[in-house]
Amino acid sequence: MANVSETLGRLWAPRARAPEGPGPGAAGPAGGAIGRSVGASVGRFLHKTSQVGLVLYALALGAVLGLASADWATRGGYPFGGVAIGAWTAWPRTGSLGADPYARAVNARRGEIPLAVGEGMLVTAATDDAGETLDATCTYRLAGITPPARAWTLTIAGRGARDPARPPMREGFTSTEILRERDGRFVIMVGPEVEPGNWLPSPRASGPVRLALRLYDTPVAASTGSLDRDSLPAITRLGCRR
Amino acid sequence: MRLRFLFATLCGLVLAGLVHIVTVLAIPALSESDALTRSGTSESLDHPQRIYTLSTGDNPAPAEAWLPIPDPSVAVGVCAYNLDDGPMRVSARTGPQMLSLAVHGRRGAFYAVTDQAAVRGALDLVILTRAQYDEALANDDENEPSRDVRIIAPERQGYVVVRVIAALPSQRPAANDAVQAVSCTIDSPNEDAAKPNG
């Protein structure tokens, strides 16, 4: 790699000087045939190096843009392949043989082991129902039901590493732990302040957070088209702490 | 000159597209942090390598976790296999907790089963290549049909993921133990069957 950049640097050098090149040759006050012949040879030299320079420019542009865009597309979450259901996004195919190359690259870079279709499904939410980004300083009300599944877990996480100063608190609920209404529906309060009932504390002091609903042993993984807004909890923002 | 510069830019952009596609396709094969590579260290073990141990009262921090955003109530273990050594047998006993097994190859998961498919409390998966499958089929005793679930793997290398869900925090130690209780062994080829026609 170092060799290549060295070579590139050496080859680039004449091109970088190209604009000021003709200056001394053309404006030489001594003039005469010597000056003109020097100018012509400099021009020929520039013409040749500019061709090489352009080729190198194209190669460098391709390499830099291609690598940077590939890095950007496979960093963090899956770029596409999700099924949007209201504020939630279901990811049914990220772990299967039919996963798109981007999802595979994301999994490979992060060391992620996604849920297989027969095993479960991941559903994430980064915004509330109004489309606002979920924020750690705000209080949210998650109310409703989940799609049929043998078990599910709802977890909250902020981006990046966990803050070591914050004591480890509840990170999520499982379907067994949750307190339900009489009709089987549930309400989970997400926010920085202590709430009665199912309270999921914000994982960090500020910044965006994400909700992850993992459905285990669920029939909907094979047919995400059957899911609609009402089959997933509604996310309503109640207010934000100043 | 300007036209040539534009042409070079255009070529660069086309090249960038090609580089982008090739890079994205090559990442899974070249990555050293992917699950397949990391699970490779467990190949000699008879039990799943713990990759996410649930935090319990005594030991809160799972040190060996490399899953980026693990589910805090699901214990995860991994058994790597290499079918060149022989078919891989994964045996699990079902318990009160939900258990699922997923078989991953390089390209993704190709089979998954939960403890609901267990026969008499036992779940036996055998992962084999097409040739090993044919051999196993030929060696089957007609009077004693095998209860194994046989899965033909598209590739020789892969890993089996064991997930056990702890529905309540008090079940977490049991979930950790349930992952360890799964056995992953290499089915040694039957000596008698190896001889041509007995």
Image (cartoon, coloured by chain):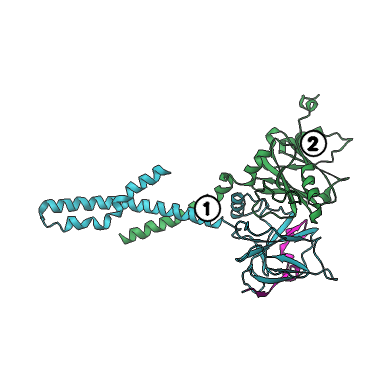
Chain colours: A cyan, B green
Q: Position of residue A180 (x, y in %)?
A: 82, 68
Query: In the image, is residue A144 above or below residue A32?
Result: below
Specify the subunit that label 2 lies on: B
- In the image, is A38 to the left or to the right of A173? left
Circles 2, 1 touching at the beta carbon (< 8 Å): no
The verdict on a common chain for dots 2 and 1 is yes
Quadrant containing the C terminus of chain A in the rendered view: bottom right
Instruction: Tell me the SS state at disc 1.
Output: helix
For disc 1, the marked residue is B21
Q: Amino acid at mark 1?
A: Ile
Query: What's the distance in space between the residues labelled 2 and 1, CA to CA?
Result: 42 Å
Between residue A102 and residue B175, name the one nearer to us. B175
- In the image, is B57 to the left or to the right of A8? right
Question: Which of the two labelled residues, at mark 2 and mark 1, occupies the earlier sequence position?
Answer: 1
Quadrant containing the N terminus of chain A in the rendered view: top left
Q: Residues within 10 Å of mark 1 (few under 14, many from 20)?
A: some
Magenta segment includes A227? yes
For disc 2, the marked residue is B137
Q: Which segment is the magenta one?
A: A214-241
Q: Amino acid at mark 2?
A: Leu
Magenta segment includes A221? yes
